[in-house]
Amino acid sequence: MKNNLNKLLFLLFLFFTTNAYSNPIDKINFIGLNNTSENSLLKEMPIKIGDEYSDSTSNAIIQSLFQTGLFSDISVTNSEGKVNVTLVENPTIKFFDFSLDSGSGFSNWLKSEKMLMSTELLK
């Protein structure tokens, strides 16, 4: 009987210590985003709000975000259930601006400039 009571106390103690060290994720913050939306990154990450945080979780976050090819540097910190993901985005081209006005002045005739792109070529 005494042996069973010791086993039960040990199991209860073990259960409460594992719960004391668990660290659930309450919020995920992205720092340094300019071109990418938070929702698209949350879909790429292997964790969700409410999951437990550990060092392996941090490595999984970094690996999954690097696989997107959008970032050159990623760091993850955790403080009181808030996971802060600091990102440095790779440079991207947002838009092109084409000006097809070659002009028809006398100076263009002297320089013999030709228009390399036409409206049909752009379409």
Image (tube, rainbow, N blue to C red):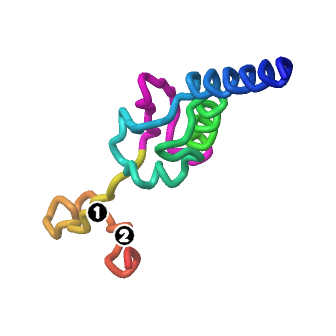
| Residue 110: quarter of image | bottom left
Compute the Cα span from label 2 to label 1.
9 Å
Which mark is nearer the camera, 2 or 1? 1
Q: Are marks 2 and 1 in contact (CB under 8 Å)?
A: yes
Amino acid type shown at disc 2: Met
In the displayed image of the protein, which residue is found farthest to the left? 105
Residue 72, visible in the rendered structure: yes
Q: Position of residue 54 (x, y in %)?
A: 61, 28
Provide residue 122's location: percent of width, then percent of height: 38, 74
Label 2 sits on a secondary structure element that is loop
> On the rendered structure, is 95 left or right of 28?
left
Q: Residue at x 56, y 42 (%)?
A: 65
Query: Is residue 76 a member of the stretch shown in magenta?
Result: yes
Camera-nearest residue between 95 and 86: 86
List the residue tagged with mark 2.
Answer: 117
Disc 1: which residue: 98
Position of 1 compared to 105: left or right? right
